[in-house]
Image (cartoon, grey):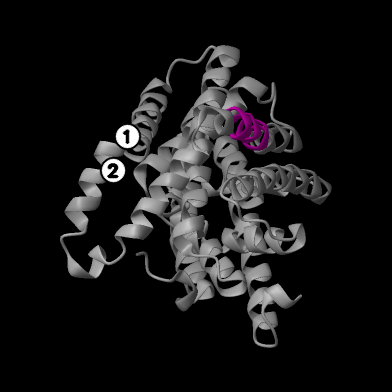
Amino acid sequence: MPANPRRSNPLKKMIWSLILAIAVYTAIIFLSDAKEVGNALSGISLYWIPVFLSLSLLNYLLRFFKWQYFLGKIGVHIPPKESLAVFVAGFSMTVTPGKLGELLKCYLLKESRNIPVSQTSPVVVAERITDLISMIFIAIIGLVLAEHQGAMIAIGAGVIFVLAIMIFLLWKKAFGFLTNLLCRFKAIGRHRGNFEKFHRNCSSLLDLKSLLISVPLGILSWGAEALVLCLVSMSLGIEPGLSVGLALLAHSVGTIAGAVSMIPGGLGLTEITIGAILLTVMPESDAAVTTLIMRFATLWFAVLLGVIVLGIIKKKDRKYPLSEK
């Protein structure tokens, strides 16, 4: 079973992630000409910030709908307000390999509702898989609209990655083989029932009906977030501006590259990938600024919200459990 992320300090993890991010972003700024980057940043109006964040909030709302749908599929029904708090608190663990730190949500439900982690953890896995599938579709749409062929390697890697995971999770023999292998260890063997429950729930969450609902939701949610790139380029006065097709392509391919690499939050690789695609239509300094502002308005805004909501939950837990609210 995974280690309980609740036992670790999310703030400490965030601080280390911030240190890594500062190092990565400082390198990007200096490699792109720090003076030019500074000039570009000085030209942006603060009035644009709420616009950027509103698209991020739309992304979170649509993803919350998917979270609620998946919970319902496995028979978990909790009040929307409580569910939303747990969902947003999971953002505090966004900067982890493959976002798997969001298993924190499962432990919060375990503590507040005594729902087994083995029952809800497939929801987090299904979220990540369907997000990747949605990103692949967005990348293909971006390729068609932008007529850009340079991203095929990342898209191909994403397709292979998703197919491999889907085969492992849905092919009973493959999953059973790994389960039998792991259960030879006594410490793991006593959890065989949890593995079997995990497999059953994954099969339920990744059936055709679920995919036809969750993948379009993912396309809409992540597509909205990709449009932040367009708005940032507009706010900077970049001419001729960034097309919707190229924004969809850059954001999706960068995210796929970061996810497949399993680098925490995709830090570095996602920014470099997005920036490289933007370089085809704008100067290096503008590409760097556009990429960094987008990442702060999406990734880091989510992490900040997650830490705040998690802090509120932990404070309330000292008085009474969520289930008594």
In the foreground, 51 or 197:
197
Instruction: Determine contact: label 1, label 2, CB under 8 Å.
Output: yes
In the foreground, 242 or 321:
321
The residue segment tinted magenta is 212-223
Residue 255 visible? The answer is: no
Main secondary-structure element of the magenta-colored stretch: helix
In the foreground, 43 or 317:
317
Q: Residue at x 62, y 39 (%)?
A: 290
Q: Position of residue 67 (x, y in %)?
A: 62, 48
Of helix, strand and loop, which one carries label 1? Answer: loop
Quadrant containing the N terminus in the rendered view: bottom left
Other-residue count near label 2 (Cα within 10 Å), few / some / many at <14 / 14–19 / ≥20: some
The label on residue 175 is: 2
* Residue 321 vertical placement versus 212 (above, below): below
Quadrant containing the C terminus in the rendered view: bottom right
- Spatial CA distance of label 1 from label 2 is 6 Å
Q: Position of residue 261 (x, y in %)?
A: 35, 43
Q: Position of residue 320 (x, y in %)?
A: 69, 84
* Residue 239 vertical placement versus 313 (above, below): above
Q: Residue at x 36, y 51 (%)?
A: 196
Other-residue count near label 1 (Cα within 10 Å), few / some / many at <14 / 14–19 / ≥20: few
In the foreground, 52 or 102:
102
